[in-house]
Image (tube, helix red, strand yellow):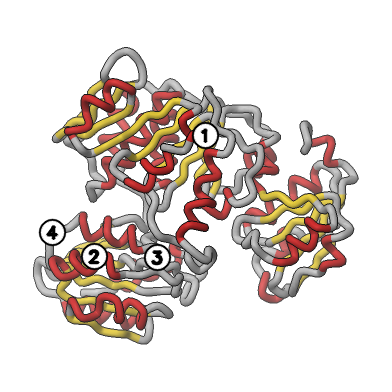
Amino acid sequence: MFKELSELKDKKVLVVGLGRTGVALTKLLVENGAIVTISDHKSKPELSGTVEHVEGLGVKLDLGGHSPKTFLTQDLVILSPGVPSSLKIFDYATQHGIKITNELEFISQFIKEPIVAVTGTNGKTSVAQLMKEFLEESGISCWLGGNNFQPMTEYVRANNPAKVVIAEVSSYMLERLEKFTPQNVIFTNLAENHLDRYKTMEDYVNAKRKVFKNTNPMTTSILNADDNAVVELARDPIVQKGRIFYFSRKPALEPQIMNIGGAVNIGDEIRVRTGPEIEYYSAKNIKMLGRHSIENIMAAILGAREHGASHDAIQVVMDRFVGLPHRLEYVRKVGGVRFYNDSKATNVHAVQRALDSFTENIILIAGGKDANLGFESLITPIKRKVKSLILVGEAKERINRDVGDHSETFLIGTFEEAVVIAYQKSRIGDIVLLSPGCPSTDMFDHFEERGDYFKEIVKKFK
C-alpha cells in the first residue's frame, strides 16, 4: 500500500470511527500531509470528549451517519476497531473501487521492528503486560499497544523505535488483515465471545484465525495446548509453516512439549525450553489468583525468551507482578467478607476462570450489556460455589433463564443496589465477586468505569 509515510501527502483518506484510534490515525495522517475526512455514525454532541481532539486540524467531519458520497471521493478508507467491517456501506465502496483497510493493517506497514501479536478470548492483556515487563527488566526496549492499550498508530507517531513491538490484537482488529505479518503469535485461548458483533461462533473464530494469515517459516506461534479450540486452529497448514511452542498446565504433556519446545507447569515449577536447554522457574511466589494465571505467565515467558529476556529478570517479575486492575483485583475485606473486582470479565469464559479461582461461598454479581452469549456452561460451578447470584443490567433476564435456578438469585435495577445487596447477603468468610460475563456499555462507557465504581461503593462499606 505505502512504503513510507511521505507517500501519504495529498492522499484523500477517510477515517471511520472517532474513538481513541480514530483520533490517533487522524493526527498521523494530518502530520504527513494527507487530506483527511472523518466519518462516524454518532452526531457531534454524542462525540463530545473526542471531536475536540481533531478540531483545528483542518479535517472534514461527516458525522451522524456514513454518506456514500463521502466514501466515493477517497483514495483510502481506514476503519477503527470498534467499527464492524460488515456494514453495507463498505461493500458499496469496495464495489466502486475504493480501498478499505483497518488500523492494524494500515499502520503495520510502517513498523519495521519485529511485532509480537498477542490474541485470544481472555488473558491477552495480562500476557502482553507481563511480556513487556520481562523484556524491560532484561534491559530490552519494547513498546506495547493495541486493544486495551494505546492505539498502534501511536508507535509510528512517536518515531522512537524499540527492539520489540507487542500488539494486543482483538478479533475486531484482525477482521480485514491482508499483509500483516507478526514475527510471533501468542494465542491464549478461544471461547464464545462478541456474538453481538458476529452472527455465529464460526464467524468469530474466522476473525481470530486471520492472525495466522501470513505465517511463514520465520514465525513462531505460542499456543495453549490445554485449549482444544486453539489446538484445532494449530492444525491449519498455514500455522504449520512456522515453528510452534505449546504451553500447558498438564504434567503428562511434559515429554512431548520439552521435545519440541514450549512450557509446562509441574507443581510449583514452570519448565521452559526455547533452545537446547530446559530452564526452570519457581512459581511459589506468584501473587496473581487463578490457575489461568500460570497459563498467562508461561505464554509471556515463551514470548519474552524469543526476544532475549533473561531467566533472572523473568523470575524477578514473576515474583513481584500482582496482576492488572479489574482482573480478579482484590479490593478490601469488610466484616470478614472479601471483595474482588473482575470487571474485565466481559464473557462467560472469563467468569468460569474467576469462579475456578475460589473454592466456595461466592456471592456473584453478573450482568451488563446483552452480547447474545449463553451462560449454561456456568451451571456446575454456580451449583458448587455460588451462594447468591445478583443479576443486573440488560442481560439479567437472559442470565436468569440460563442459570438462575441453580442459586439464590436476585434481579436488581441499578448497579449500586446490586453491590449493596451482595454485601447484605454476605457472611463472614464469604467472597463478593464482580465478574459480570458481559460488556459494560449498557450502564458504563467501559469496563474500567464499571470496576472503579464497584471499588468506590465497596470502600464506603463499614
Q: Nearer the viewer, mark 1 or mark 2?
A: 1
What's the mark number on residue 28?
Answer: none
- Name the residue rendered at 56%, 55% in the picture: 172
Measured as percent of width and height from the top left, residue 218 is found at 53, 23
Which mark is first along the chain, 4 or 2? Answer: 2
Instruction: Name the residue beneath numbered marker 2.
Output: 339
**In the depicted view, which residue is nearer to us: 156 or 147?**
147
Mark 3 secondary-structure assignment: helix
For the residues labelled 2 and 3, the Cα–Cα distance comes to 13 Å
Measured as percent of width and height from the top left, residue 173 is found at 58, 50
Instruction: Name the residue beneath numbered marker 4.
Output: 359
- Mark 1 and mark 2 residues within 8 Å of each other at the beta carbon: no
Q: Quick check: 329 above or below 373? A: above
Residue 298, by quadrant, is top left
Which mark is first along the chain, 3 or 1? Answer: 1
Name the amino acid type tagged 2.
Phe
Q: Residue furthest top?
A: 276
Q: Quick check: 205 above or below 403? A: above
Instruction: Name the residue beneath numbered marker 1.
Output: 238
Which mark is first along the chain, 3 or 2? Answer: 2
Q: Which image quarter is the C terminus in?
A: bottom left
Q: Which of marks 1 and 3 is in front?
A: 1
- Mark 2 and mark 3 residues within 8 Å of each other at the beta carbon: no
**In the depicted view, which residue is nearer to us: 53 or 89?**
89
Name the amino acid type tagged 1.
Ile
Mark 4 secondary-structure assignment: loop
**In the depicted view, which residue is nearer to us: 242 or 353?**
242
For the residues labelled 4 and 3, the Cα–Cα distance comes to 25 Å
- Mark 2 and mark 4 residues within 8 Å of each other at the beta carbon: no
- Name the residue rendered at 85%, 64% in the picture: 70
